[in-house]
Image (spheres, grey):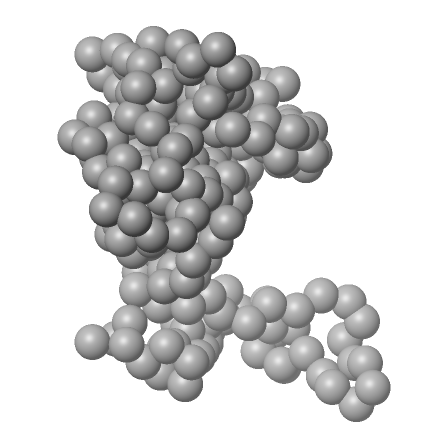
Amino acid sequence: MKIDILTLFPNMFEGFLNESIIHRAIEKGAVEINIINFRDFSKLNNHQVDDTPYGGGGGMVLRPEPLIDAIDSVRKENTKVLLMCPQGIPYKQKKARVLSKESHIVLVCGHYEGFDERIRSFVDEEISIGDYVLTGGELPAQVICDSIIRLLPGVIKEKSSEQESFTNNLLDYPTYTKPQEYRGLKVPDILLSGDHAKIDAWRTLEQEKKTKEKRNDLLN
């Protein structure tokens, strides 16, 4: 998979790309990630990428030319262009699985007060990671990258991604490790029984119980 990220702040991705699972996925060749500063596409003398909004109002608005030119520079026939935007569709695990099947994704990070409305005509989808407003699209882009890359073949153990929250519209079951007892809190006896059929049944019941208690909306 190839992911191109269009941003005004490339340095925000340094730690993200050089640590943990994302770094290992890049080293393995499971994913190629390119950080592109779309300020480089500005044709103005001072490389300006924003301006005041028509009709008045506070803040600065991203101009369409540099961002659309940046999109055009990387878009291919099989490219999926996603705009990070609080007005977009809510991002879910199901969408992460769909996107993990794409061969080329472009993530567009907005900033400042917003962006010229005409930019929307050059993207395929708008995605929101929650009902709140951030200073820019860089953090949402990292969230989406992380959620997609971990699903790519060979990045993490396949069984790990198959048995986790939201896979079957349920939250994940409780997990435990050593020691068997800590500060009076014990590991459930069923997990020590060695009876895998009973353990699987217990885990399913615990998933349903936890989902009903914490995210009953998923059951609807």
The one nearer the camera, 9 or 94, is: 9
Asked whether residue 181 is in view, the answer is yes
Side (left or right) of 175 relative to 202: right
So how many labels did they put on this image? 0
Residue visible at 42% across and 80% down? 214
User: x and y percent of residue 205 in the render?
Assistant: 39, 78
Q: Is residue 36 above or below residue 81?
A: above
- Looking at the rendered image, the quarter that the N terminus falls into is top left
Looking at the image, the residue that sits furthest to the left is 121
User: x and y percent of residue 147 in the render?
Assistant: 45, 43
Q: Is residue 6 above or below residue 156?
A: above
Asked whether residue 154 is in view, the answer is no
The one nearer the camera, 135 or 164, is: 135
Looking at the image, the residue that sits furthest to the front is 56
Side (left or right) of 67 relative to 153: left
Q: Is residue 11 above or below residue 128?
A: above
Residue visible at 50% across and 39% down? 138
- Looking at the rendered image, the quarter that the C terminus falls into is bottom left
Residue visible at 35% across and 23% down? 67
User: x and y percent of residue 42 in the render?
Assistant: 42, 15
Residue visible at 71% across and 65% down? 177
User: x and y percent of residue 115 in the render?
Assistant: 33, 38
The one nearer the camera, 56 or 100, is: 56
